[in-house]
Every structure is written in structure tokens, then in C-alpha cells.
Amino acid sequence: MKTAVRICVSLLEQRRHDVIACGVGEDFCMEKLLESMLKADRNPCDIHLPSRNDGGDTECYDMSYVYTYLDAPNVREVLEVDSKRVGAWQEYNSNASASGVVHAPV
């Protein structure tokens, strides 16, 4: 693990301005560091704690109170969320944005 950390840091520092190389470094770090912790059933935010991972996410702490708050009618109104068009609040999924290039509307 110590060797993987050194390699990970080196890859990310050397390649921070090269998107493709940075992606390779990120993949290496995810595989060698984060996935190892998850396989060991450790919390990725605090390795002293057991994992909260139910197999689908890497959530470190119970955030249900945040979801309830963000879905409250008064909060949605202040944020100008059109409830007819937008369903319940969902946590950001990094896999969605990492799956391809996001294009802004023209």
C-alpha cells in the first residue's frame, strides 16, 4: 500500500495538466487505494470505522437528513426547483460525469 501511495502521488503530480495521463493516474489510485479499502470493509473517509458500503456506493456517513432537507418544499421553492419537472433530490454520481465529455448547451 505504501508503494501504491507513492506511485499515485507521483502520477497525479506529474500529470496534472494532461487530462488523459491524469485519468490513468486516477484509475491507478482508485484501483490500488480506494478499492483496496472497500474490499477490506473499511470506511473510505475514516479507515478506523467499518464500511457503510451496501455494495452500491462509497458513502461515508448517514446523509439521509441532508436528502430530507433538500427535498423539503420550502427549500425547493427557494432554489426554484420545478417539482413538476424534477423528481426527488439525488446525490451527485461521479460515474455519470466520468463516463464521457459533458457538453454545454449551445
Image (spheres, rainbow, N blue to C red):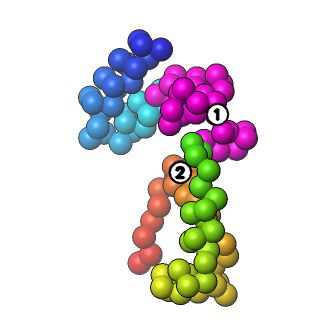
Q: Is residue 97 above or below residue 25?
A: below
Could you say whether the residue bearing mark 1 is in a helix, strand or loop? Answer: loop
Q: Amino acid at mark 1?
A: Ser
Closer to the camera, 53 or 87? 53
What residue is rendered at 48% in x and 85% in y? 78
Give the residue displayed 66% in from the left and 39% down from the top: 52
In terms of depth relative to the viewer, which is nearer, 96 or 75?
75
Q: Earlier in the sequence, mark 1 or mark 2?
A: 1
Front position in the image: 62 or 38: 62
Asked if the magenta segment contains residue 65, the reply would be: no
Residue at horizontal 53 percent and vertical 80 percent from the top: 75
Picture residue at 61% right of the left edge, 74% below the top: 71
Q: Which residue is mark 2?
A: 94
Within 10 Å of disc 1 (Cα), the crowding (few <14, some 14-19, many 20+) is many
Q: Indicate which disc residue 105 carries.
A: none
Task: Looking at the picture, tell me which residue is in the foreground, 13 or 35.
Answer: 35
- Start-end of magenta stretch: 29-58
Q: CA distance from mark 1 to mark 2?
A: 19 Å
From the top left corner, tell me how far across and down residue 14 is, in percent. Answer: 26, 29
Residue linked to disc 1: 51
The disc labelled 2 sits on which kind of residue?
Answer: Ser
Residue 18 quadrant: top left
x and y, in percent, of residue 42 in the image: 60, 28
Q: At which x and y percent is residue 7? A: 37, 18
From the image, state whether disc 1 or disc 2 is nearer to you.
1
